[in-house]
Image: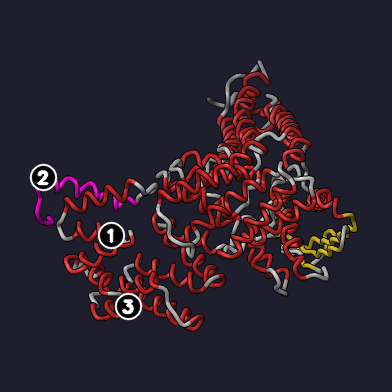
Amino acid sequence: MTDTPTEREEGGGWARLRRRKVVQWGVAYAAAAWTLLQIIEYLAETYDWPPAIRQVAVPTLSLVSLFVLVLAWYHGDKGHQKISRQELALLASLVLAAGGVLWWVVARFDANAWLPASAGVAIPHAVPTDAPSVAVLPFVNMSSDPEQEYFSDGLSEEILNALARIPGLYVPARTSSFQFKGKAGDVAKFAALLGVAHVLEGSVRKSGGRVRITAQLISATDGYHVWSQTYDRELNDIFAIQTEISTSIADALQLRLTAQQKLAAELSPPTRNLDAYQAYLLGRYELAKYQRRSIAMAIQHFRDAIALDPQFADAYAVLSVALMGGKTHPNAPVVGRQELDEFVQTIVMPELSKAQALGPGRPEVLAATAQLARYDGNPERALELYERALAQVPNNGEWLMERSNLLGVLGRFDRGLAASYEAVKRDPLSWPALNDHIIRLLMFGRRAEVDPLVERFMAINEVQARGIRTIVASHDGDRPEAVRQYLTIFDLLTAQDGSVALPWRHALALQFARLGMRAEVFNLVPPMYAHYLMGEYEQAIPELRSNYRESGSRGGSLANALYGAGQFCESAALYRELLSSDRYPRAGSLVRAADALRRCRDGSLSRQ
């Protein structure tokens, strides 16, 4: 490949590339590719195409450019087909440049775009500060009657849910936004804690049959009022106002929505009966307190709403949830499994069945059905229903947590970790979500991510955060640090109400037992538990057995003690009894049960 005299006379390699039309073809292709990308972008926005189509287009067009340049060389000039060293170097440079663009695009390619919204395999990233995002703070009750607070809270939550349905808009969950209820402070600080660029705040004044709502959208960066509006309407217009506010905010944030997206973001009003709607909001207000007395009040409010509108699907659904909550609340009287099953079939299911008949696709109905599916031992069905509910209301903190837990129950731990990332992302100030997520991170060996989350946890709930610190310390093998954290928890709890619940004392006693500090263990818990924690199973068994026969409690501890003492046949029989009524047994219990049964059949008389 040597330069001929003719070629040397015709100018440098760049001129020859131009003569062979390589440069012209490259420029023309670049212009055509850019135009095609604009068309794809327009069609994708108009018809709501998935992001994967746009992301595939860029590397594909970059790859085609390589073939265009080579094709231009061979067809640009029929008279000279030999290539000089200089021409080869220039052509190779162009090909490498196009290849570099292709590599850069592929390296930045978002694999999440290929996944359905419910796949949950890829770990979502934190929301960028420049992404469209808004937190809805609880609207202030300006009514003369303080008891109208349920209405302002309910309206705030309805607006929050309406905004959460808008594609491309990040809205933190109610659990996190309502952390700032009644608190005066810097909007920028609130926004930073919630990870948003904007904050929506307002007030509600309800009087007779009229309502006055003032709403304002504030930029967290400079405190600028991006949008504000006052609505002075008849109370019957409350649903229209909610839609108007969410639409106005989408416009203020310059979110371009297709007609299909706007339609999907709208959820028909749960009822047209205003009195029934107010009773429903009042029921949700009481249910959110999650106290035995408030749950009972919520149940009555939901029944009132149904009496006013027998077609109110959401009221039936949330009533079934409240009924279950009343029976399973930690302070509720303990009932046996058979009694609870009978309650579910005769009291809960009739209400849920009515909800399913009236509004089978509504998110509240789907979530209530999911709760009963989980109770019935069908986690696969429960997961499917929660994901369908989250597709409509993607920032419901409770449902996000349930999805994460169900994935763990089903053994899909990678998806469970991704789901816990999503729960913390959308509900950043929820301590249960943080607690669950930190434990999962430790399970996956992602220790480096834990400390910042624990610090956030400390600002939300110090007692529970120190509880998670004990788990982190145990994971790190630092048992003295775990003990120090528990002692601090004891001081905090004692200062609050002067007592420390048995579970906390039991947890500290376990740490002391692992350190071999026998006296401290017996000082914290009754002898039955102390012997059990110290591994003195023979001494623990008599009282554990008596306790189980009289009240049916501590059966798991008794089975474990029997196993530890080498009484495998009795242990296996008890494990079988316990596991028959345990819908979600722990892996450790299953392993010990299987081993106890094997040793019993083999006639083993002692631990090996």
Residue at 54% in and 44% down: 370
Task: Answer with left or right where residue 430 lies relative to residue 26.
Answer: left
Q: Amino acid at mark 3?
A: Leu
Residue 601 inside the magenta-drawn segment? yes
Q: CA distance from mark 3 to mark 1?
A: 24 Å
Residue 260, above or below 82: below
Q: Which residue is mark 3?
A: 524
Q: Is residue 104 visible?
A: no
Task: Answer with left or right where residue 465 lies relative to residue 102.
Answer: left
Residue at 85% in and 55% down: 235
Give the mark, 3 or 1, whose residue is nearer the N terminus: 3
Q: Which residues are magenta?
A: 586-608
Seen from the viewer's position, the closer of residues 560 and 295 is: 295
Give the mark, 1 or 2, whose residue is nearer the N terminus: 1
Whole-percent x, y for residue 442 in the image: 40, 59
Q: Which residue is mark 2?
A: 602
Q: Amino acid at mark 1?
A: Arg
Q: Give the quadrant of residue 540.
A: bottom left
Residue 57, above or below 537: above
Q: Nearer the viewer, mark 1 or mark 2?
A: 1
Whole-percent x, y for residue 552 in the image: 33, 59
Tag of residue 549:
1
Q: Residue furthest top?
A: 78
Seen from the viewer's position, the closer of residues 402 and 36 is: 402
Q: Amino acid at mark 2?
A: Asp
